[in-house]
Amino acid sequence: MTRLIFLGPPGSGKGTQAQTLALHLNIPHISTGEILRQAMKEQTPLGIKAQSYVDSGELVPDELVQDLVQERLNQPDAQSGWILDGFPRKVTQAVFLEELLKETHQSGEKVVNLDAPDEVVVTRLLARGRKDDSEEIIRRRLEVYRTETAPLIDYYRDRHRLLTVNGDQTQEEVTTELHKIVASES
């Protein structure tokens, strides 16, 4: 059973890689952004709560995101494995997830850190050409990512769950490396 958490800076290709791998393994790719949008669209009780934050331009609080993740991991399609993308973002969320997985006897998750140097990521994001992606904004997002997520990388490394993949390769090379890692872990 494959349970993976994907970490990586913006522009490292983790969303694309997580989707590709999830299709290959026939397990759900669970992105927190996607869960939020889905819950709001379906107007679930949690979705309605989340909508009120989104509408007022606020960040959705941790507890609510955690509840949404818990709800999603309990769905039938997630029982045979999953790839989590965008969660946890900080150590407190990792601790929550660890407890949740213990309760549901789903522990044994591995963490894929798709790492790429800042220069590579900045170049990639600028090439995407989104109008809100100025170099300054991209570098700021990277700084926030490194500050918030660096402790997570140590957290999972200390628990021997961390698998680092070089994100500074072609998309195909990264995909191949991920397939190898998953095959050797299962």
Image: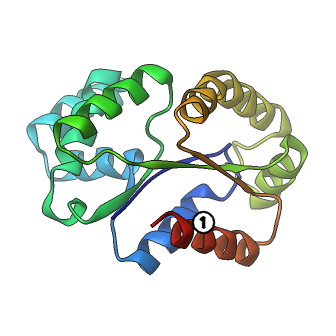
| Up/down of 180 relative to 108, above or below | below
- From what the image shows, is residue 182 above or below residue 58? below
Q: Is residue 55 visible?
A: no
Q: Position of residue 55 (x, y in %)?
A: 32, 30
**Residue drawn 74% across the image and 60% down it:** 128
Instruction: Specify whether 87 is left or right of 41.
Output: right
- State the image coordinates of residue 150 (x, y, percent, origin top left): 66, 27
Label tally: 1
Residue at the right extreme of this rendering: 119
Q: Amino acid at mark 1?
A: Ile
**Residue 96 location, x and y as percent?**
32, 26
Q: Secondary structure at mark 1?
A: helix
Residue 177 shown left or right of residue 34 in the figure = right
Give the class, few, some or many, for how many residues have Cα within 10 Å of label 1's Cα (few <14, many ≥20). Answer: some
Q: How is the image coloured?
A: rainbow
- Residue at x-position 70% and y-position 32%: 141
Question: Can residue 155 be seen by looking at this rendering?
Answer: yes
Q: Between 44 and 167, which is closer to the camera in this rendering?
A: 167
Q: Which residue is mark 1?
A: 181
Q: Quadrant of the C terminus?
A: bottom left
User: On the picture, is 63 further left or further right than 16?
Assistant: left
What is the x, y in percent for residue 4? 45, 54
Q: Is residue 4 above or below residue 185?
A: above
- Residue sitting at x 48%, y 68%: 19
The residue depicted at 76 percent of the width and 52 percent of the height is: 125
Compared across the picture, whether 14 is left or right of 67 comes to right
Q: Give the farthest residue toward the left.
A: 45
- Location of residue 23 (image quadrant): bottom left
- Between residue 158 and residue 112, name the one nearer to us: 158
Name above or below for residue 18 compared with residue 117: below
The quadrant of the rendering that contains the N terminus is: bottom left
